């Protein structure tokens, strides 16, 4: 079950949704599901579901459908879950705190190794047993322990500097909440959450009714 | 400058990025820019930029490029900015507070009309002069003043109920941060921010290096 280089990002971005629906099915004690039934739940066509999953292997069985638990496990493996990821959060404002409080972190295999900020009022506070430290301590933390993912929740003016420091200390995954496009080497994966872009997509969709 | 029904969501989702880069150019006193120069900044090809913008009108001029300020204004209009939107936030946890604190709200024309929660510890607190109210008061607020956008920041188990209440009181735009797909009528626009799906896309991209 290897990562396939020729799989489009559109397919990749649908995988976490499959994972979420399969988890729900498991929680509801559903053992197997046809692509048609899954289609009705998830809102993709049955043919798209079959195509998406065929990128990674031959999971379904004619006349039986998918074994929910097996497919869930396979998709977790494809998504790189089951690995342990060390993670740091830079910027302990509302968004940084929301991420730190994210309840599923441990379950998914993410170990929060540190939260950093410049604000003396925040430094020393604890979020879920992790103390907010001075951003001046970030580099030392990164050098002491291999860190996989850096979450950037600082203002846009500082985001590239933070990104540079993370990457120069071995971080290969950047989860960026700052409203700016960051630049890093080719071997660094950057995933952006641009909230204002999401909101403006909504206003576009609303516009006709105003 | 009307909304075109045949424009794909992929194009729509790029518009806020154009808007962001054009705003930066304006802030840096850049008056005009060629699609080639814009391409180098924004990371789309010059041909894609021309194609995207041609969906909405004839903005560029051969040999001159785009007038930055005019194009910025046009894109704002396409995105439905310049209108005023009344907005309520349901759920005043970290994410709800982050949205309420979003500094550009006023500038973009969003009027935050209320923040609601069930937690007695939060009710009565103020975020940027807006008091957090009991969620039992939500319906009355919606009935007293036409509300355009509801931001859902409650746990997934309550999200559909909140959505139903918002929609039945005239809200046509839902900005959903709960990790669940909401169902509403066809005339309701739903924009999801599924943080865990974004994070799992990042672990997928990281996986090969583990």
Image: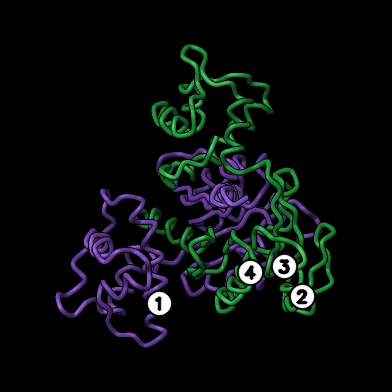
Chain colours: A green, B purple
Nearer the observer, A127 or A110: A110
Residue at 71%, 51% in the rendered image = A110
Instruction: Measure the alpha-carbon separation of dots 4 and 1.
Output: 28 Å
Please, is residue A2 above or below residue B17 in the view?
above
Quadrant of res B74: bottom left
Instruction: Measure the alpha-carbon separation of dots 4 and 2.
Output: 12 Å
Instruction: Measure the alpha-carbon separation of dots 1 and 2.
Output: 34 Å
Mark number displayed over residue B23 = 1
Please, is residue B148 above or below residue A83 in the view?
below
Mark number displayed over residue A166 = 4
Q: Which residue is mark 2?
A: A137
Please, is residue A87 above or below residue B169 in the view?
below
Label whose residue precedes the other's in the sequence (4 or 2): 2
Q: Which residue is mark 3?
A: A142
Label whose residue precedes the other's in the sequence (3 or 4): 3
Quadrant occupied by the N terminus of chain A: top right
> What is the crowding at mark 3: few (fewer than 14 residues within 10 Å), some, or many (at least 20)?
many
């Amino acid at each position: 079950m290897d990562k396939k280089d020729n799989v489009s990002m559109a397919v990749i971005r649908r995988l976490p949704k499959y994972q979420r629906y399969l988890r729900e099915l498991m929680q509801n004690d559903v053992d197997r599901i046809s692509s048609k039934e899954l289609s009705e739940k998830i809102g993709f066509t049955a043919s798209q579901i079959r195509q998406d999953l065929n990128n990674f292997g031959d999971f379904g069985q004619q006349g039986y459908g998918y074994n929910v638990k097996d497919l869930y496990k396979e998709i977790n493996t494809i998504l790189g879950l089951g690995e342990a990821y060390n993670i740091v959060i830079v910027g302990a404002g509302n968004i940084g705190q929301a991420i730190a409080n994210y309840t599923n972190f441990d379950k998914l295999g993410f170990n929060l190794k540190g939260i950093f900020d410049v604000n003396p009022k925040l430094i020393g506070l604890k979020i879920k047993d992790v103390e907010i430290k001075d951003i001046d301590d970030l580099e030392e933390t990164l050098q002491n322990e291999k860190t996989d993912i850096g979450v950037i929740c600082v203002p846009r003016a500082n985001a590239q500097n933070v990104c540079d420091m993370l990457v120069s200390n071995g971080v290969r995954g950047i989860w960026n909440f700052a409203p700016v496009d960051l630049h890093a080497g080719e071997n660094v994966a950057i995933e952006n959450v641009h909230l204002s872009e999401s909101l403006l997509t909504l206003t576009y969709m609303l516009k006709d009714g105003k």
